Amino acid sequence: MLNYIWPIMIIISVFSAIITNRIPELSNSVLSGAKDAIDLTISIMGMMCFWTGIMKIAEKSNLTQKISKIFENFIKFIFPDCDCASKATYAICMNITANLLGLGNAATPFGIKAMRELQKSNKFKNTASKSMIMLAVINTASFQIIPTLLCTLRQKHGSENPMKILPYLWITSLCALIVGILAVKFFERKNGD
Amino acid sequence: MQNFGFYVIPILIVLIVSFAFLKNVSIFDEFLLGAEEGFGSTISLIPTLVALVTAVSMLKSSGALELFADLFYPVCTFLKIPPQIAPLALMRPISGSGSTALLDNIFSNYGPDSVIGTIASMIMGSTETTIYILTVYFGSVKIKNTGHALFCAALADICAIVTAILVTKFLIL
């Protein structure tokens, strides 16, 4: 995927910079971008360590197993090739919980943990398994009950009712999520037979 | 309700830690084991992040988003969609901080309760930084062939944007 997206992004950037006459800015952005990546890594590292640590505690006390019981039927439907009592499933459940609660910075560590567990049982290490694709797509269409950042921003700019859009947001997110899941299922069927 | 977000994290942590405490788990040792794992996966993300963040930073500085937004201008006016939405919709999949800055800008210029502000809020709330998530998730396990993931994720995003505009036009306003 990135073998196509990455060069396209770079080529578009260079041509756009020529058209808009922003070559100096582009040149600086290469240097600052590489530095920003390391800043980003350092800023997410604390959260990554913290949440995977918390997850380990939850795992040892069998709490993750209990949470995954709640999602059991959903998981069975969405991730058919996933064993319901595996570490991968527990991480997926924690990832879904964090997404629902709007904890973006906790969802990513759980999601990455789930990807690593899924990779262990993946037959072709270079190719994404069905469950991996499903997990990634669910996360790109993340469904949040309370989008905290959005509501805070709306309040900051003097919205009369920052939470007013929430029910509509749920409808919209749910539509997107269902379309995403059905699209993945469609490809699974098509490629599976 | 507004402050609900601030309660989630403390409640979650207290629940997990006290539950483990009752079950006699050696909490601190387990935390360290888990945290070490998180440390390792963050380090292994560095090459992926350098590649992606640099490309995104180049895209932002090159004015490409404005050029593409201009291309969408006639389409937007034809469909009676405020064209100011286009840069946000283009920025959203590649950069969380970039799209938040654009949203903040839209709110200052038009207000969060205007048509533009509402559509922008709806798009922001119902989509995610798709390219970033796909890159990080697959990059963390060095998957090269991601199959239909990008297509499905893009389809979900387009669905979210279309639904956001329709819902705003017909239900909210």
Image: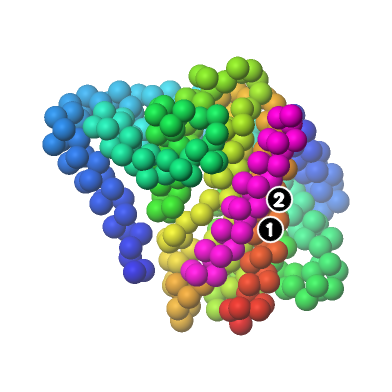
Q: Tell me: residue B62, above or below residue A10.
A: below
Q: Left or right of B122: which side holds A84?
A: left
Q: Tell me: residue B81, above or below residue B30.
A: below
Residue B133 percent across, percent down from the top left: 58, 41
On the question of residue B13 being in view, the answer is: yes
**Mark on residue B159?**
1
Circle 1 — which element?
helix
C-alpha gap between disc 2 and disc 1:
6 Å
Please state the chain letter of the residue tagged with numbered disc 1 in the rendered image.
Answer: B
Q: Which residue is mark 2?
A: B155
Which color scheme is applied?
rainbow
Circle 2 — which element?
helix
Please state the chain letter of the residue tagged with numbered disc 2 in the rendered image.
Answer: B
Residue segment shown in magenta: A166-193
Mark 2 and mark 1 in contact? Answer it, CB < 8 Å: yes
Residue A2 percent across, percent down from the top left: 71, 32
Residue type at mark 1 is: Cys
Residue drawn at x 63%, y 74% is B168
Nearest to the observer: residue B4 or residue B111: B4
The N terminus of chain B lies in which quarter of the figure?
bottom left
- Write down the quadrant of residue B132 in the picture: top right
